[in-house]
Amino acid sequence: MARTGSARAAALSIALMSTAALAEVEFHMSTDRTKVGTEDTFRVQIVVGNAPNDALVQFPKTDDFEVLGRSESTEMGFSVGPGGAGVIKQVKKYTLTLRANRVGKLTLPPATLKSPTTTLSTEALSIEVAKGRLAPDRPPQPQHNPFAPFGIPGFPGADDEELTPLDPFSQQDIPPNEADLFLRASVDKPEPVVGEQVTYTLYIYSRVDVSSVNSPTMPKFDGFWSQDLKTSATLAPEQRLVGGVPYRAFLLRQKAVFPMRPGEYTLSAPEAEITTGFLFAGRAVKKKGNELTIKVKPLPAGVNTSNVGQWRLSTDVTQTEVNLGEPVQLRVIAEGRGNLQALELPKPEVPTGLRAFDPQTTEKASSAQGRLGGSRVVEYVLMPQQTGTFTIPGLTLDFYDPDAKRFEHARTDPITLTVKGATGAVPIAPQAAPLTTDGPKNELTAGGLKPLRHTARFSTPRAPLWQRPFFAPLALAPLVLALGLAIVGGVRRRLAQEDEPSRQRRQAKAARKRLAQAEHVLAEGSTEAFYGEVDKALRGFLEAKLGQAVAGLTRPQLDELMKGRRVKEQVRTRALAVFETCDMGRFAPGMGDAAARQRALDDAAKAMEGWS
Amino acid sequence: MSWLLLAATLAQYTPAEAQAVFAEANAAYYERDAGVAEQKYEKLLAQGQGGPDVLFNLGTACLAQGKLGKAVAALERARRLSTDDDIEAQLALARQAQLDRVLGDTGEAPFVQRLAATLDGDLVALAVLALSWLLFVAWLWWRRSEGTAPIRVLVLAGVAALTVLATAGLAAEVYVSQTVREAVVMAQTAQAKEFPGDQARTAFEVHAGLTLRVMETQGSYTRIRLPNALEGWVESSALEPL
């Protein structure tokens, strides 16, 4: 079967080849525009059909037009000719991209097809050229996105850059007089909403060799929050067509910018110094790009949120069953695409019985397929204050999806947390809570480390009181004093218990001492006092000698007493005489002279001496 | 020397500064940084700003880090300065974590030690002072009386009895202070040898946090006695005297 089929195909090819030579030559030229501006490009197509193999096409030559690009394609066709014979038709199409160099009604000369046997010419074309730009932007070429059916809604696929509504390579015009080298800035969304990402891209288009580029001067993105997406470290060319003209395009810078307020913003033209050529043949030229206008629209009314992009929200906790006093980490995670810096996350409602500390936020920015995004994790530390079961309600994140052109809502499920009695944890005093008769009870279990002292009374280490120097003397002082007093008392008592002779001697001694005092009175001249002292001295002496008080006794009584004590007659007489002298001296005149006093004093002394 | 004393005096914290350091240490502890808290409490102690509260918190911070020896030493010192249930509870936790179990320990110290531990030494000393002078005054009062008035005799006897009791308490305090010296094992493991010397045979081991009695010191070794009368010689560097 296979051998039979191959033979038939070979026969058909031979038949077709034999009839091809019989086909007529087709040669004509056409243009897509007859009215153009000096800043417009237009295309001229030259079609050559069934030309001999050695035929040459000569393109029109004129100074009125500049040829910016040229391409060619070949098509093969088959048709049934007269008599049922098959005819193969080969058609070559040459496409020239031209731009007029001057204003006026210009003529594009005919093209020529030359072969050794014949020469054919097309008709000339008449082109009316005006100043400036007449033609509107060409609509983008429809492209098929093979990944779109499998992409996630709201998350562009791998070919996002190719599907951008403004293709920077196909729709831009070539600047006049800069056909070989120019800067081109573009944005993917000229009319975004507030907070939507706009990608700003700056390219060099070149048909000459580019060796280096100094850091370009970028426009100020006032009214935007911006971040670099791509910055070229080396010049990597890509082949691009601009208005049908092939260029090498070098990406200089790509930034993601997010408009912050509605309004119309003009981004100034970027500039860069580009060095063309190599080594010593290099030449630096300064190029200025194009301005861009961005019209920022406000968010649609409906939901009070400033979040824009495509976001997902989730929550998790480190554990759903926890002991009292042990912390729990609650994480709120948002991830997706959009301006992460401007994202506002909802706060969890922490029920009474759980204490939430200030959260810690970590952000991780990323970019994929030219879209900025990332993730933000807000971590709350929850400290259970009492036992029981607690529910943290689910969270809702509202945002505007610019791709879907509507508000979306990302939601999380509620979280249930069970707090058990602490074992070995540091208990914390519960917060005041409204009194309830039902609901979870606060189970209090003793144990674990006791809490710290929150205030301190500071004291310097010191020796005990009993070790200080003053203690022993102070403590022993009463004992020493008591001993001293006891000793003194004992002495006194002992002194009080003297024998009779001693007592009499002591009294006699005292009487003599008193008599000696009377001598002093004698010198002073007071008669009455003198005799009084002598009388007292003698009486005291007698009391000591007799062992009995003699005060108040009359002289006879005293005499009788002395007799009873066997006192000598002579002594008794002398003592009584002294008493009489003293009475006379105190009460009778004439006894006050010094001689009488001295005599009385001598008599008293003799009476005392005679006694002993 | 005087310059050093003056510098040390000037470098000491004011009460407000000490309270601030104390609060910082507490905050560090509650932020799960017990190591920093421990350093700050020790700084207060080094500056002479001690007391039972600082020692209690230091012991708690050490206990939270598993530093048993240091924790027990601080808590025992706190207990000597203040009788508090919290201190006892913290010490009980430390004992639970301690590795050694002293077999045959009746758990009760001799009466004199228990008496001394119960009494406030300064308070007893103050009572002895006051009562001795009161007794002296009562004695004088009694001496001046004519004959033997019963009331004076009773007062004198009562004051004398109180003075004797107070003096006995003080004597117990002095005796325990002078004869009973305790220490805490600081090293994770300390070998108790049969006699002081590196060549001596190891009789048993003790571990961090054990409180024991110090009997005598010879060279770099200290003779220890456990509550069950077990004795051995350990390196003095492994112990922290209380």
Image (cartoon, grey):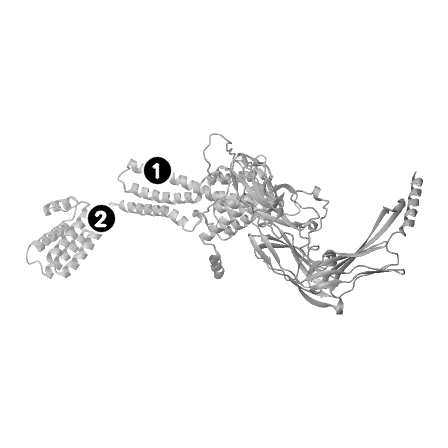
Residue at image mark 2: A504
Alpha carbon separation for disc pair 2 and 1: 43 Å
Return the x and y of residue B13 as percentages of the image width and height.
47, 54
Residue marked by disc 1: B157
Alpha-carbon neighbours of circle 1 within 10 Å: few (<14), some, or many (≥20)?
some
Between A375 and B104, the one lying in front of the other is A375
Residue A449 coordinates in the image, percent (x, y): 53, 40
Q: Is residue B72 visible in the rendered structure shown here?
A: no
Q: Is residue B50 above or below residue A123?
A: above
Subunit of label 1: B
Q: Amino acid at mark 2?
A: Gln
Task: Tell which residue pokes out farthest to the left in this image.
Answer: A589
Location of residue A123 by image quarter: bottom right
Q: With A276 as the anchor, is A542 left or right in this view?
A: left
Q: Amino acid at mark 1?
A: Ala
Query: Marks 2 and 1: same chain?
Result: no
Q: Quadrant of the N terminus of chain A?
A: top right
Residue A263 lies, in percent from the top left, at 55, 53
Residue A517 seen by the camera? yes
- Residue situated in front as seen by the camera: A392 or A548: A392
Q: What secondary structure is found at the residue carrying circle 1?
A: helix
Instruction: Find residue A412 and report its image quarter.
Output: top right
In this view, the residue farthest toward the top is: A438
| Residue extending furthest toward the bottom | A280
In this image, B125 relative to A165: left or right? left
Q: Nearer the viewer, mark 2 or mark 1?
A: 1
The one of A131 and A127 positioned closer to us in this rendering? A127
Residue visible at 52% across and 39% down in the picture: A350
| Chain identifier of the residue bearing label 2 in the image | A
